[in-house]
Image: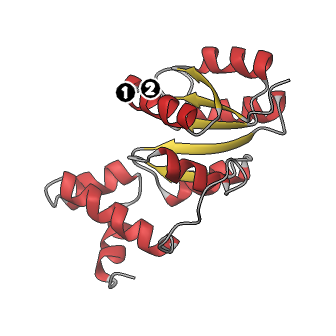
Amino acid sequence: MNDSKTILIVDDDDVLRLRLEKAFNNRGLTVYTACDFDGAIELVRTKRPDMAVLDLKMPGRGGMELLKEIKDLSPSTQVIMLTGYGSITNAVEAVKLGALNYVTKPADADQVLSAFGTTAVDQEPPEFPPPSLASAEWEHIQRVLADCGGNISEAARRLDIPRRTLQRKLKKNAP
C-alpha cells in the first residue's frame, strides 16, 4: 500500500493547475486534478483525497458549493480555498463551511502546503515569519488598487466590498 499523501487540485486555470500538480508531485504527494465541479466530485467519490485545493470562482458551480459537497462526501479531507480576488467575507464563509485555510493567488506549492500546516510533507520551517492577516489584507488591497489604476470604485467592486469601506481601510496606516 502506498503511504503517500493525496491531494486534489481543482482550478479552471490550466497553467496554475499543471504547475501545482508538478510541484506537489516533486514533493512526494499523489496528485489528482480537475478543472470543474463535476470532475472534482467524481475524484472525491473514488479517491477520497487527504487534502484538496479549490479555486473559489470557476465557471458553473463554484468553489464554495464544491467545498460543501466535499465536506459531505469526505469529511476527513482538509480543504484550502484558493482565489485571485479574495475578501474577508469569503474567507470567513469558507472557514465556516469547513475550509482549513484561505490562500490568495498567485500562490506556489510551498504557500499552499504551509496553509495546510507542515504535517503534509517534511519540510523546513520558513526562515521568515508569515505576514499577519492585517498585512496580507493591506498588501492585497494595494495590489488590486494598482491593478485598477488607482480607481477606488473599480477596486471596491473587484474586492467585493463597499467603496466607503475600502476608503476607510485606505485611510488607516499600513500594518
User: Compared to 22, does 119 lie above or below?
Assistant: below
**Neighbourhood count class around disc 2 (C-alpha, 10 Å): few under 14, some 14–19, many 20 upward:** some
User: Compared to 16, does 124 lie above or below?
Assistant: below
Choose between 82 and 124: the one closer to the eye.
Answer: 124
Quadrant where the C terminus is found in the figure: bottom left
The image's mark for residue 40 is none
State if disc 2 and disc 1 touch (CB < 8 Å).
yes
* Left or right of 22 in this view: 171: left
* Left or right of 164 in this view: 21: right
Question: What is the image's colouring?
Answer: secondary structure
Amino acid type at image mark 2: Leu
Which residue is label 1 attached to? 15
- Location of residue 136 in the rendering, given as x and y in whole percent from the top left corner: 43, 67
**Which quarter of the picture shows residue 15?**
top left
Choose between 140 and 109: the one closer to the eye.
Answer: 109
- Location of residue 96 in the rendering, given as x and y in whole percent from the top left corner: 72, 53
Element class at badge 1: helix
Element class at badge 2: helix
User: Compared to 34, does 8 lie above or below?
Assistant: below
Identify the residue at horizontal 19%, vertical 52% (top origin): 148
Amino acid type at image mark 1: Val
Which residue is label 2 attached to? 18
- Location of residue 82 in the rendering, given as x and y in whole percent from the top left corner: 51, 43
Identify the residue at horizontal 69%, vertical 47% (top origin): 120
**Cα distance in 3D space between marks 1 and 2:** 5 Å
